[in-house]
Image: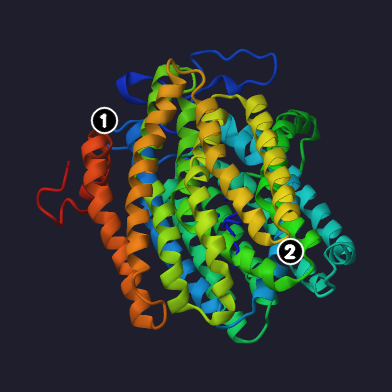
Amino acid sequence: MPDATHPDPGHSDAGEPGPAGGGPEGVSVAATPSDATPGQTLDPDSPPPEAGTVPTAPAPRGEGLSDKAAKGFAFMAAQTILVRGVRFAGMFVLTWLVMPADFALFGYVLTVSQFVSVLRNAGVRDIIIRRQHRARKWVNPGVWLTGIVGYLLTALMIVCSPLIAEFYGHWQMVDLVIVMAGTTMFQSLSQAPVGLLQGGMRFRLLATVESLYNCGLMILTVLFAWMGLGAMSFVLPFLVCSAARTGVLWAYARPRVRLNPQFRRWKYLIGDSIRLMSADVARTVTLQGDIIILGRVFPGLGSVGHYVYGNSISRQSMMLFSRNLDLVLFPTLSKIQRETGRQNAAFVRALRMLAVVGVPLCFLQAAVSDPLIHTLVPERFYGTIPFIVVLSVGMAGRLMISPAESMLRGQGRFGMFSLLNWIFAVLYTAGAIIGALAWGDPMGVAIAIGVITGFGGVLYVLIALSRSETPVRSTIRVFAVPVLAAGGACGLGWWASTLLPREGVVNGVLGALIVVAITGVLYLPAVWILERDVCNEFLQRIRAVVGNRLGSRIPGLRGA
């Protein structure tokens, strides 16, 4: 199924979803300029967080923001590996239970849900994060705003469901859209508690909730598909899991809500929300524009279903890290936005570690898709292989966009954030249209999207680093070694695997193992030699996380 990690817990749902203490060296991070309303100047001696905000668990002595962020990301990445494993397995199981046309129908419904989510989110989550030390002031109007907007959007989706079905030319979509509309209210009401927990750096709790949510989605989808519900198997789990997720988030965040909606404060929320929503609209065009174009240009569901399935598989490695890194980076970078040098250094270190780990996974995913698809799925899904290859390579660049967006938001550059999203959305849509018309086949769209997403990641990083002293050099340093080393290693691994026939489970598994083995033998020594400092820091972070959690059980790990 297409990745369903929301942009509110995100970024998909697709796809996929409390104040910290002081930073190192005694730097106070209790307040940021974003906490002030327009025209207001913050007192540097701002008061402590008001009662009612989400408390942050006390950090061990000497633990600063970078340590908390690294541990939060490590824990979330570990959780995500489990989730992605479940989703990966579920995706292959679903190929035996549903048809490519069912994936296409769900892809169309998801385009509607994602555009509705732009208004549903209303930017409240980001506003609460950036005004965390005064969260109680903004939670109540934020909950009322998202709740009312969610109710109106639910009604709008139900009323417009026949028009949506007519737009795509498939009337079986009416019931699917109505069921998906039921999730809108629950997802709207989750925005404020997510903002409180994320701003409070409750990363482990958020990671656990999102893991259970995404695992529940896949498990229920497989169950309903086994029951023969077809495309409805993808939609019903959203309703069930969104309701459960919202209830859990409210139970932990406990936002204080009054009977008074405090309409006079809405103007401040809406003012900031418009800038955030503009960027969300552009991001949604980027994420869903290709599916909309495919639905209009190619009326057949089979080839579009291959594209949707291939697109979903290609996102797995990217979503493994970028979504969790965004959850950690935005609140962390926001708290040090007045320390430009420290902020840039932290951002570059995070990107380099992400590139060293994430880029080879994207390339490896492309290289093993041919032998694995021939081994694990029925013949009717063999057409997804070229889509997975092309889109997975492009995801190596897309991997960097979410962290770059966190940097721009953490710097308070919402105007640039919105403009860059719109530029990318226009390029993305234009590329999809040109690819569809020039090739006359969904594969043309995949090639165009793969190229644009690959180079788009470079552009995002370059602009996010534009305030640093050496933006071009830093951008090259992030991409050069991982892309060249992983590209060469995975390419040789794939070539070696083609020497085996594709028929048979044994040959398919053996081919995939050859790709992984050759890639590992070539890539790991290369990156260890050329990116030694990044590898050392990555290993230190892992040892620190494992040591703190298991120090009493494994001698020598504590304090590693």
Amino acid type at image mark 2: Val
Looking at the image, residue 545 sits to the left or right of residue 347; the answer is left
Q: Where is residue 334 in the image (x, y as percent from the top left)?
A: 50, 28
Observer-nearest of 330 and 91: 91
Query: Which is more N-terminal, label 1 or label 2?
Result: 1
The image position of residue 438, as x and y in percent, is 73, 52
> What colour scheme has been applied to the protein in the rendered image?
rainbow
Left or right, 319 with respect to 67, comes to right
- For disc 1, the marked residue is 62
Please indicate, yes or no, whether residue 235 appears anywhere in the rendered image.
Answer: no
Provide the residue designation for mark 2.
109
Q: Which of marks 2 and 1 is in front?
A: 2
Residue 433: image x %, image y %?
A: 74, 49
Q: Dividing the image into 4 quarters, which one contains the N terminus? A: bottom right
Circle 2 Cα neighbour tier, 10 Å, few/some/many (<14 / 14–19 / ≥20): many
* Residue type at tag 1: Gly
As helix, strand or loop, the secondary structure at mark 1 comes to loop
- Residue drawn at the location 39% of the way across and 52% of the way down: 77
Q: Are marks 2 and 1 in contact (CB under 8 Å)?
A: no
Identify the residue at the far bottom of this view: 227
Badge 1 density bin: few <14, some 14–19, many ≥20, Cα 10 Å: few
Q: Residue furthest front?
A: 499
Residue that appears at 74% across and 63% down: 108
In the displayed structure, 40 sits above or below 381; it is above
Q: Is residue 208 left or right of residue 13?
A: left
Q: Which residue is drawn at 56% across and 54% down?
A: 249
Q: Which mark is residue 370?
A: none
